Image: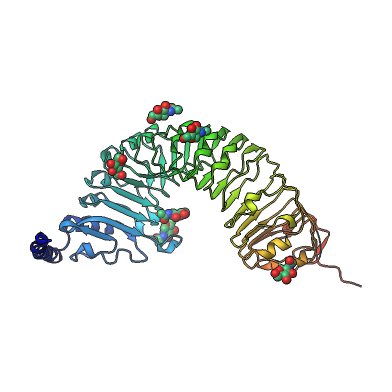
Amino acid sequence: MKKWQTLLPLLLLLVLALSATASAAGCHPDDEAGLLALKSAVTADPTGLLSSWKPGTDCCTWNGVSCREASRVTELSIYGKPGDPTSYLSGTIPPSFSRLRKLVGLYLQDLKNLTGPFPAALLRLPDIKYVYIRNASLSGTIPDLSPLAAKLGALGLAGNRFSGPIPESVGKLTQLSQLELARNRLSGGIPPSVGRLSNLTTLALDHNELSGVVPNLSGLTGLYTLQLSHNQLVGEIPRSLAPLAPQLRFLELGHNRLTGRIPDFLGNFSALDTLDLSGNLLTGTVPATFRYLTKIFNLDLSGNALVDPFPEMAVKGIESLDLSHNRFHLGKIPRWVSTSPIIYSLKLAGCGIKMRMEDFKPAETYFYDYIDLSDNEITGSPAALLNRTQFLVSFRAAGNKLRFDMAGLPLPETLQDLDLSRNMVYGKVPAAVAGLKTLDVSYNRLCGQLPKTQFSASAFAGNACLCGTPLAPCQRRS
Ligand SMILES: *[C@@H]1O[C@H](CO)[C@@H](O)[C@H](O)[C@H]1NC(C)=O
Ligand SMILES: *[C@@H]1O[C@H](CO)[C@@H](O)[C@H](O)[C@H]1NC(C)=O
Ligand SMILES: *[C@@H]1O[C@H](CO)[C@@H](O)[C@H](O)[C@H]1NC(C)=O
Ligand SMILES: *[C@@H]1O[C@H](CO)[C@@H](O)[C@H](O)[C@H]1NC(C)=O
Ligand SMILES: *[C@@H]1O[C@H](CO)[C@@H](O)[C@H](O)[C@H]1NC(C)=O
Ligand SMILES: *[C@@H]1O[C@H](CO)[C@@H](O)[C@H](O)[C@H]1NC(C)=O
């Protein structure tokens, strides 16, 4: 306490002196030059992201720029507006960007018209630790990353147009906790050296053109997120993933060419929140150990060749479930599904369900956005179910044995997508369907004059006696 009391005025003086020199001198001339070089390499800046970047003013005050000691720029963060193409900043990152000698973090996001190669200037920055250039349009190959070895803590290049292989040198980035290269055009194998990045918590390589097998990642025991979906990976789900069980929350291996059975050890992933194995070539049964996945919220096993019996799960609340298009004969909608208090998406198309729609009485319908029960043997009417949903966006039950009067079907106001094709639905098409974005009621037993809608004839084809635009005009009664 005593010490502080004497030190405090001194410290205060020091701080004042420092800030005085900073505001007088402005930021370091090299930093100013580096930033202005970037600005002059920007050919369009429709929303004025860089309009505060003016020569002769303190660059530490410029939009997106942060400084620390001695007015050196340590962080640069420029965020565009996602989904607004007219706002995109255009340009490239020039070589003289390397004058930002003290840069630690670079965060460029949603700058869709930022082009050019991986900025080689970054490889020359001695203190660089965090590099995120996400949702831009950088292209070419990812260079040898050796100069950043044992230094880089995060590399996020998701959502660009990088092509070619992931460099083997990525394995030298031993301090890396996040590696996000998703949504590029990367090809070749996943370098086995990735397995040496023992500090990784996130590995996201999804939506590329990666081939080969899932390498041995058994040493990545801190991994929280593993996203390898939408590639061309082959082989089985490797046993070497088993040690990741206590930590892993997100395991996404969907839309690859994985073969073999779903391994029993996945039931040990007690922390798992999301498991996506959809769109692979997996065979055999779903392991009975899945009943230990009590924290799973999102489970997608659709589009494989999995067979019965499906295990009774002990999850308290599933949020989204997709088991569509396997070789299941579930018979009924499982109890652990209909009792979920938080479910918003249920997709059980082609799951061998034989029941009356009226017997599907979910405990809670409030959160439902998507229901797809197509290609089962469901009878009766969905009227009571739809009447209980308030925010449903999509209801699909094509290819069943539904038999009800469509005129009395309550359509939730939020509904955009309705597919009741290939059933035995009768009566008139209600005028309320005009508010939908997509509709298919073809191949039913509907009759009468169609309401005015924007849908084409194929939406109404194959019915008993529908008439009026876009079908043939109704016969005038004589
Ligand atoms: C971004 O690039 C696209 C394609 O090159 C171009 O059509 C668009 O006008 C550009 N947007 C801006 C804001 O410059
Ligand atoms: C990038 O764009 C994707 C959609 O294309 C979006 O889901 C994601 O949130 C964006 N990521 C960032 C970091 O802006
Ligand atoms: C990497 O892990 C080591 C050992 O667990 C730790 O000391 C170090 O701080 C971590 N590095 C980063 C960047 O998280
Ligand atoms: C995976 O690597 C670890 C060492 O990191 C090794 O002990 C284990 O045998 C390897 N597993 C396979 C299947 O190669
Ligand atoms: C699950 O974990 C336990 C304890 O960690 C282990 O004994 C068991 O072999 C594991 N099960 C599978 C199928 O790997
Ligand atoms: C929908 O619910 C309301 C009130 O809950 C009820 O009066 C009405 O009959 C129901 N309609 C259908 C078609 O089930």
Viewer-proximal residue, 401 or 110?
Answer: 401
Q: Is residue 66 left or right of residue 313?
A: left
Q: Report which quarter residue 173 is drawn in.
A: top left
Q: Is residue 363 left or right of residue 180?
A: right
For image coordinates 40% across by 37% down, the residue present is: 165
For image coordinates 19% across by 66% down, the residue present is: 57
For image coordinates 43% across by 63% down, the residue present is: 86
Viewer-proximal residue, 148 or 449?
Answer: 148
Which corner quadrant of the figure contains ligand 2?
bottom left
Viewer-proximal residue, 426 or 184?
Answer: 426
- 214, above or below 345, in the image: above
Residue 268 locus on image (x, y percent): 50, 38
Residue 162 locus on image (x, y percent): 40, 44
- 113, above or below 128, in the image: below
Residue 151 locus on image (x, y percent): 26, 42
Residue 391 appears in the rendering: yes
Question: Quadrant of the image for the C terminus?
Answer: bottom right
Residue lying furthest bottom: 478
Residue 347 appears in the rendering: no
Residue lying furthest front: 1
